[in-house]
Image (tube, coloured by chain):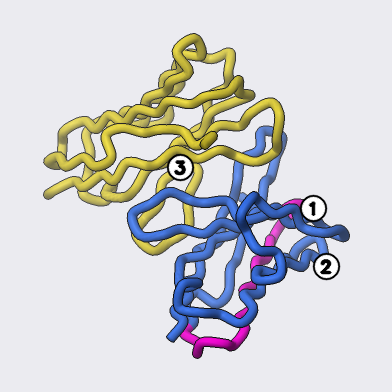
Chain colours: A yellow, B blue
Amino acid sequence: SQQGEEDPQALSIQEGENATMNCSYKTSINNLQWYRQNSGRGLVHLILIRSNEREKHSGRLRVTLDTSKKSSSLLITASRAADTASYFCATDPFYTDKLIFGTGTRLQVFP
Amino acid sequence: GAVVSQHPSWVICKSGTSVKIECRSLDFQATTMFWYRQFPKQSLMLMATSNEGSKATYEQGVEKDKFLINHASLTLSTLTVTSAHPEDSSFYICSAPFGTENIQYFGAGTRLSVL
């Protein structure tokens, strides 16, 4: 399967703590994206990091990319209960216009 | 921003009937749209790529006669689940890319329950 792997599968933290999710993938990519999905809803794009970038910030989100290890991480700082959702990484490979989604991390933030 | 609308959000049908799900790009044109299926607590499984004006491209293992896709205009793709059975019950989501970096904009999803 071309699907990316994410860990942890599930993560439970208290409000105010940081949440870190990791993603590994298999092919060369144009970029890597992170999406969020609230329960029973569609996905929402959060942030994109290009293959020639190593780190990117957007508000409370920090993404890193290591193309030599084919891995990425998403850090959410000072988490809030409203951050409770599933988070998916998605790679944009050279060879196709389809995104390859990871297995997802279910984040639960307790107030 | 780019908005994708998906309708209906929830449908219940009897076994053997057909169900049509619509995916519309509201403020942009989409020559390509994607249809996914998602099981509880799992990732998205790409079913097919919908191409405006031509046949859809189905992923391996997806029955094209079971899941009919039509992309007749630059803003509308439809997925018809034909002769639905309980095992077709699932969450179906569509998306369309917008911009130069292949960012996908998703519909809100359709929960299909086949009785």
The residue lying at 43 percent from left, 61 percent from top is A41
Q: Position of residue B55 (x, y in %)?
A: 82, 59
Q: Nearer the viewer, residue A66 or A26?
A: A26
Which secondary structure, mark 1? loop
Per the model, the C-alpha gap separating discs 3 and 2 is 28 Å
Which secondary structure, mark 2? strand
Q: Nearer the viewer, residue A78 or A28?
A: A28
Residue B79 visible, this angle: no
Per the model, the C-alpha gap separating discs 1 and 2 is 10 Å
Q: Residues within 10 Å of mark 1 (few under 14, many from 20)?
A: many
Q: Which circle marks residue A35 in the picture?
A: 3
- Quarter of the image for residue A102 reads top left
Is B41 drawn above or below residue B101 in the view shown?
A: below
Q: Which circle marks residue B31 in the picture?
A: 1
Do discs 3 and 2 belong to a common subunit?
no
Q: Is residue B15 left or right of residue B82?
A: left
Q: Chain of mark 1?
A: B
Q: Is residue A79 left or right of residue A90?
A: left
Magenta includes B65?
no
User: Which stretch appears magenta?
Assistant: B12-32
Residue located beneath label 2 in the image:
B72
Count of numbered circles in the view: 3
Q: Amino acid at mark 1?
A: Thr
Furthest toward the top, the residue is A68
Residue B16 visible, this angle: yes
Magenta includes B26?
yes
Q: Amino acid at mark 3?
A: Tyr
